[in-house]
């Protein structure tokens, strides 16, 4: 029997697919420092973002045949080394796109209407004077319609963000390495009929995105040892009062430079779902009135986790059955 360790858990729908296919799927969490020993008893391991699968684990477990990542980024896996050693490495690049994109807009709406700060202050609103002062403070919000959204990284998630932005009437400026025109389909679901529109998005140079965007969202990998995509040099090129959203990886945006930009007013507001020292978060970020925070939940919706579990199970089962 093929044994699979789902060390960061797996949705019930994915688990059922494994058991129906005759696999043994184990969801008991193995601590990182005990992982190499535990993996001697398994044919494959499935992880999310918490568990690291590095060269030492691969070397210690010649029995291991497959590493699966429940999600998009695989920077917690030594992918090239694993494949060099003959292991299959798979992920689920499509399953969480909708959930991550919706979180981007949850943060954008939150920032532009000051909901993150209002929710902190409203519990103390026990008089007309406080209510009126808060109403005055939070009555200078802005609409997203007509604003320019720069999207750094234009893969599955970036394209889903673009669809939502276009639906809101925003202007979209995508950037990707090896830039080329990208066609995306926008679906409009109505009560009695469905309609769709194919749009060709022209990718722009990085500096143009930085200097023309009202908001910037990042959707790029961040391999170990990489330099930040956004740091002081890039922030200096941005519009005054720009908003930045990072749901990609901690370190893609240099947090020290981000704080300097927030404190100077160059950056109007920032939203972070991921952090450099995760799970620890800088006190200055936690307490900053112009920062909206969430605890790395981009792909953590019920729907996304079910899709991820099913997609990963199907890929893994197919690989083992074909070998």
Image (spheres, rainbow, N blue to C red):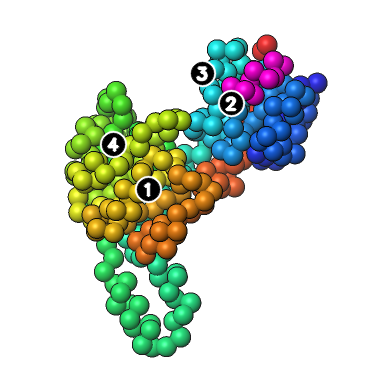
Q: Residue at x 69, y 31 (%)?
A: 35
Badge 4 or badge 2: first in the primary sequence: 2
Magenta-colored segment: predominant secondary structure: helix
What distance separates the C-alpha of mark 4 from that of mark 3?
A: 28 Å
Which of the labelled discs sits on residue 54, or is there none?
2
- Could you tell me how far apart the alpha carbons at marks 4 and 2 are, in whole angstroms? 33 Å
Task: Looking at the image, tell me whether mark 3 or mark 2 is earlier in sequence order.
Answer: 2
Residue 65 lies left or right of residue 121; in this view the side is right
What distance separates the C-alpha of mark 3 from that of mark 2?
10 Å
- Indicate whether 42 appears above or below 159: above
> Which quadrant is home to the N terminus?
top right
Using the image, tell me which numbered label, if any, was put on residue 174.
Answer: 4
Q: Please name the residue that numbered disc 1 is placed on.
A: 255
Q: Position of residue 248 (x, y in %)?
A: 43, 40
Say if mark 3 contacts mark 1, CB within 8 Å: no
Point out the stretch of residues depicted in magenta: 55-63
Between the C-alphas of marks 1 and 4, the distance is 23 Å
**In the rendered image, which quarter is residue 323 located in?**
top right
Q: Secondary structure at mark 4?
A: strand
Q: Nearer the viewer, residue 126 or 312?
A: 126
Residue 323 lies in the magenta-colored region: no
Q: Residue at x 30, y 56 (%)?
A: 262
Looking at the picture, how far across and down is residue 264, in whole percent?
A: 24, 58
Chain-order first, disc 3 or disc 1: 3
């Amino acid at each position: 029997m093929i044994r699979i360790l789902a060390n960061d858990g797996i949705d019930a729908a994915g688990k059922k697919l494994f058991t129906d296919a005759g696999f043994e799927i184990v969801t008991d969490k193995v601590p990182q420092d005990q992982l190499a020993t535990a993996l001697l008893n398994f044919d494959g391991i499935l992880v999310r973002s918490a568990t690291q699968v590095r060269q030492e684990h691969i070397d210690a477990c010649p029995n291991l045949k497959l590493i699966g990542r429940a999600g998009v980024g695989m920077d917690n896996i030594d992918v090239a080394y694993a494949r060099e050693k003959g292991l299959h490495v798979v992920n689920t690049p499509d399953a969480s796109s909708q959930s991550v994109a919706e979180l981007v807009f949850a943060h954008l709406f939150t920032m532009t209407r000051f909901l993150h700060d209002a929710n902190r202050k409203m519990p103390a609103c026990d008089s007309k004077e406080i209510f009126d002062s808060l109403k005055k403070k939070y009555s200078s919000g802005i609409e997203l319609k007509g604003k320019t959204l720069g999207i750094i990284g234009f893969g599955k998630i970036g394209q889903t963000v673009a669809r939502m932005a276009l639906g809101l009437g925003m202007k979209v400026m995508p950037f990707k390495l090896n830039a080329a025109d990208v066609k995306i389909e926008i679906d409009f679901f109505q009560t009695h009929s469905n309609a769709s529109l194919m749009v060709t998005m022209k990718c722009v140079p990085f500096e143009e995105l930085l200097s023309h965007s009202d908001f910037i969202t990042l959707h790029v990998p961040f391999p170990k040892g990489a330099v930040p995509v956004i740091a002081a040099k890039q922030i200096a090129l941005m519009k005054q009062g720009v908003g930045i959203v990072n749901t990609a990886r901690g370190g893609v945006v240099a947090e020290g430079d981000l704080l300097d930009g927030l404190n100077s007013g160059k950056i109007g507001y920032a939203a972070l779902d991921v952090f450099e020292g995760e799970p620890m978060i800088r006190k200055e970020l936690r307490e900053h009135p112009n920062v909206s925070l969430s605890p790395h939940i981009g792909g953590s919706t019920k729907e996304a986790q079910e899709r991820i579990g099913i997609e990963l199970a199907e890929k893994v089962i197919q690989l083992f059955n074909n070998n």
